[in-house]
Amino acid sequence: QVELAESGGGLVQAGGSLRLSCAVTGRPISSGGMGWYRQAPAKQRELVAFIISSTATNYADSVKGRFTISRDNARNTVDLQMNSLKPEDTAVYYCYFRDFWGKGIQVTVSS
């Protein structure tokens, strides 16, 4: 059974930073790519960042230069460092791995 557990969300002022972490159990993350998605109220879930390896990453245009995704195969975790946060980054953030999803974690950015 594969399980994903997100942590690190919360409330932050615009311009601030948060670091999300996703811990995976049940399968080594070295077996595939991992991603962070988000869903704001009344909007569709969208890709934020995806990582295959440290040199193979993909970001949504809206977060390029502000967010950084990284993975630690030894710890079986994937992190999302979010800097220069904006109110429009407010959403529930989900971790994704090989067709499995975490439950999501709230990130709220106040103006």
Image (cartoon, grey):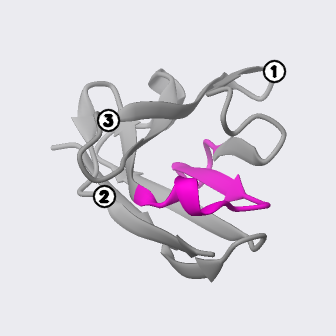
Q: Is residue 52 left or right of residue 14?
A: left
Q: Quadrant of residue 106?
A: bottom left
Q: CA distance from mark 1 to mark 2?
A: 26 Å
Residue at image position (53%, 29%) is 30
Q: Quadrant of the N terminus?
A: top left
Q: Position of residue 71 (x, y in %)?
A: 65, 43
* Amino acid at the residue labelled 1: Thr
Q: Which residue is mark 1?
A: 55
Q: Which residue is mark 2?
A: 104
Q: Quadrant of residue 101?
A: top left
Q: Position of residue 83 (x, y in %)?
A: 77, 60
Above or below residue 10? Residue 92 is above
* Amino acid at the residue labelled 2: Gly
Above or below residue 68? Residue 85 is below
Q: CA distance from mark 2 to mark 3?
A: 11 Å
Q: Position of residue 43 (x, y in %)?
A: 29, 40
Which mark is in front, 2 or 3?
A: 3
* Amino acid at the residue labelled 3: Arg
Above or below residue 38? Residue 86 is below
Mark 1 or mark 2, earlier in chain = 1
Under circle 2, the secondary element is: loop
Under circle 1, the secondary element is: loop
